[in-house]
Image (tube, helix red, strand yellow):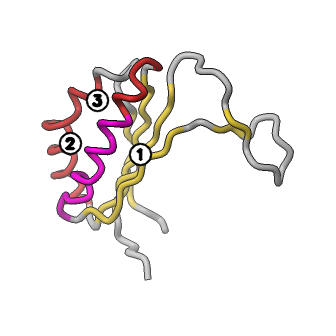
Amino acid sequence: MKNMSAFSEVKRFQVKPEKLEDFETLIRALAPEQEKQPGCISVKYMKRFYTIDGVELGEPPRELTKIVKCIKYFSYWEFDKKENYGKATKWFFENHAKSIFKLLIMPFDISCGDSIY
C-alpha cells in the first residue's frame, strides 16, 4: 500500500542550451545524494524533449527538433513527511542551489504539497 501521508515537490528547471551537458552531469551526481536524505521515498528527473502537439491520439509523441530559449527539466522528490522535506530542502539550497542557478536562464520553480496517490 502506498504511503498516503507522503509529501512531494516538483521543480521546473529552464537550462541554458549551452549548459545542457553541465546540468545533466550535475544531476547525475546530485540525485544519489538526494535519495540519501532522511525520509526520501524517491527522486526522479525528466528532460522534456518530446511533445504531443500535432500528434494523433494513440501515436507516440514527436521529438522536439529545435531549442527555442531553453531546455526544460523537471524533478519529482517525494518524502515520508513534510518535516523531512523541509530539512532536505535546506540541505539542497545550502549545498547545490548556487551551482544549479548558474546553468539556468532564471531561478527554478518549486511546487510542493501532499501526495494524493
Amino acid at circle 1: Ser
Element assignment for label 1: strand
Q: Earlier in the sequence, mark 1 or mark 3?
A: 1
For residue 31: magenta?
yes
For residue 112: magenta?
no
- Residue tagged by mark 2? 92
Q: Position of residue 3 (x, y in %)?
A: 38, 75
Element assignment for label 2: helix
Q: Position of residue 38 (x, y in %)?
A: 17, 62
Say if residue 104 shows up in the picture: yes
Q: Is residue 101 above or below residue 83?
A: above
- Residue tagged by mark 1? 75
Q: Nearer the viewer, residue 112 or 26?
A: 26
Please provide the residue range marked out in magenta. 24-38
User: What residue lies at 37% left-to-right and 30% top-to-bottom?
Assistant: 108
Res 100 → quadrant: top left
Res 43 → quadrant: bottom left
